[in-house]
Amino acid sequence: MDGVIGGVLGAFGLAASAGLNAYIPLLIVALTAKFTNLITLAQPYDALTSWWTIGVLALLSAIEFFADKVPAVDLVNDAIQTFVRPTAGAILFAASAKAITDVNPVLSLIMGLLVAGTVHGVKSVAVRPVVAASTAGAGTPVVSFVEDLVAATVSLLSVVLPILMLIVLVLIIWFFAWWVDRRKGSSPRTV
């Protein structure tokens, strides 16, 4: 039962991190499946372990890393990623859930799509515009770096310790809610 619960938690964590950065969790899963026995990807997801796929994912990770740090370019990147991140989440959810359980692939793809799409939507519609507007774009690289760090951490924990990943994810959500509440309380009120 721990394997099933861990697989489902890991699938949710990987899909959520894909909503922040599509390529970091895909690369982590590909490398983990290639070099360890922590993940065994079933067909067709085992294509992630191909050297060509790993190389392309590394290149795309580097491009997104730098594109997402530049104000204005990050908005174009987010628009492009609106299609890529939910797709990556769907693939990750289906690949990791299938490794542990016999969840229907269509259900897995839909769940991953919804999780990654929701995270990406919140990030690109609610968080990024507020950061860009309130810091005149200066906060964009910092927030992007934090997003990449969270995506990498949640991805690694999703693979290695899915239960701990759940705890970290709850703490991140709590911190975000606290931060938003604090920002609302510190804004000047007009009479």
Image: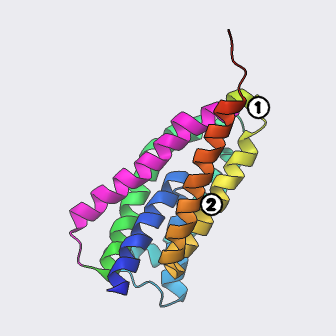
- Compared to 99, does 145 lie above or below? above
Query: Which is more toward the observer, 177 or 82?
Result: 177
Residue 18 percent coordinates (x, y): 49, 58
Residue 57 visible within the image? no
Q: Earlier in the sequence, mark 2 or mark 1?
A: 1
- 39 lies left or right of 188: left
Residue 105 percent coordinates (x, y): 24, 67
Residue 168 visible within the image? yes
- 115 lies left or right of 164: left
Please report the residue visible at 20 percent of the width from the left and 69 percent of the height from the top: 104
**How busy is the neighbourhood of tag 1: few (under 14 within 10 Å), some, or many (20 plus)?**
few
Please state the total of marks drawn on the protein image: 2
Please report the residue visible at 66 percent of the width from the left and 45 percent of the height from the top: 68
**How busy is the neighbourhood of tag 2: few (under 14 within 10 Å), some, or many (20 plus)?**
some
Q: Amino acid at mark 2?
A: Val
Please report the residue visible at 23 percent of the width from the left and 62 percent of the height from the top: 107
Please tell me whether mark 1 sits on a helix, a strand or a loop.
Answer: helix
Query: Which is more toward the observer, 189 or 113?
Result: 189
Q: Which residue is mark 1?
A: 135
Residue 182 percent coordinates (x, y): 67, 39
Q: Which residue is mark 2?
A: 150
Query: Which is more toward the observer, 118 or 31?
Result: 118
Asked if the residues shown at circle 2 and circle 1 are in contact, with their CB atoms under 8 angstroms apart, the answer is no
- Compared to 94, does 67 lie above or below? above
- 69 lies left or right of 109: right
Residue projecting furthest to the front: 191
Q: Which residues are magenta?
A: 102-131
Residue 149 percent coordinates (x, y): 67, 61
- Compared to 82, does 60 lie above or below? below
